Image: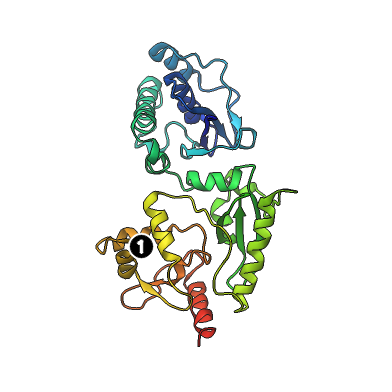
Amino acid sequence: MADKIVAFICTHNACRSQIAEALARHAGYEGYEFFSAGSDPLVQIDPNAVRIMKEKFGIDMHSQRSKTIRDIPAPDIAISMGCGVKCPYDDDWGMEDPTGKPDEVYLKVIGQIQERLKETFGEHELNLKELFDRHFSDRMTPARYRLIFANTISRSVMDTPIGPLRIFASGEAVLGVEPAERERADAGTEAGKISADRILPGDASGELVKACEAELKEYFAGERRAFDLPVNPEGTEFQKNVWSHLQQIPYGETRTYGQLAAMVGNAKASRAVGMANHCNPIMILIPCHRVIGADGSLTGYAAGIEAKKFLLQLEKRYTE
């Protein structure tokens, strides 16, 4: 079985990513091949980091060079190391700017990365993504990095009555349907530089994107109540369980968060179910818009409350 490709990614210059890659390679985790990348990678990592890694851990990083996100192999697992504008001193590490104290800073950073690597690869391989989502959080999750940068995924933007939607697909399944307006949140990042459409020529992923566009057009025209396309949303096992139960809510009907929690098998988990509902990456095909508050309120929706109201009214109209 081929090694899984793991990419440590920074949204800026890949300093922490390079440290994580070096530590992971040095640890010799079997079954994985490690890479680091950034949107604006350093020609050479901070000399302080090179010195400390050599003195404290016996790891020679002189020859290590980070790559751009586009230059690494398509990863099986993409791990966000956070924004690196002030790397490794930025606020998400809980440190003040320790100018003049590189040893103290890097030892703390390295220690944190070591613990996460040991915890994750050593004991929790099945929860790999969940752990890194929690410990190396960024506004762009590893799952989203995969959608945007993996070179085996096609995407396109289509106009709909609730605004433009971006569709992602691999050769096997639809991976994402999201508001195209989300690109505003990506402004200033590598993701903000991507083109709206990328249909891989002669690849099944492009055909799935086109098929998804066609079925969504039928849905908005009131000609389709169920979708026939395979979907493969990326998330934790709990999230996937919630999303599979969302697909059991019939067209034209709604359920409360409490009712959905009971469907999932834990009536007391309505808050966690609500969070999973909010994280649904494939809107409409996985109908999170059919979940409402206990008082009948529409609550939140990725495309906005008005879009959620429109979808519910559309389905009601075609079931009367």
Q: Is residue 70 left or right of residue 314?
A: right
In this picture, is 77 found above or below 229?
above
Q: Quadrant of residue 314?
A: bottom right
Q: Quadrant of residue 246?
A: bottom left
Q: Is residue 19 left or right of residue 269?
A: right
Q: Residue furthest front?
A: 1
- Mark 1 secondary-structure assignment: helix
- State the image coordinates of residue 196 (x, y, percent, origin top left): 67, 55
Q: Is residue 282 left or right of residue 299?
A: right
Please name the residue shown 41% across and 75% down the image. Answer: 254
Please name the residue shown 51% across and 17% down the image. Answer: 61
In this picture, is 277 found above or below 110?
below
- State the image coordinates of residue 12 (x, y, percent, origin top left): 54, 37
Characterize the local packing of mark 1: few (<14), some (14-19) or many (20 or more) Cα atoms within 10 angstroms.
many
Q: Residue furthest bottom?
A: 320
Kindly identify which residue carries mark 1.
274
Camera-side residue of 226 and 49: 226
In this picture, is 217 found above or below 107?
below
Q: Is residue 202 left or right of residue 151?
A: right
- State the image coordinates of residue 281 (x, y, percent, origin top left): 50, 57
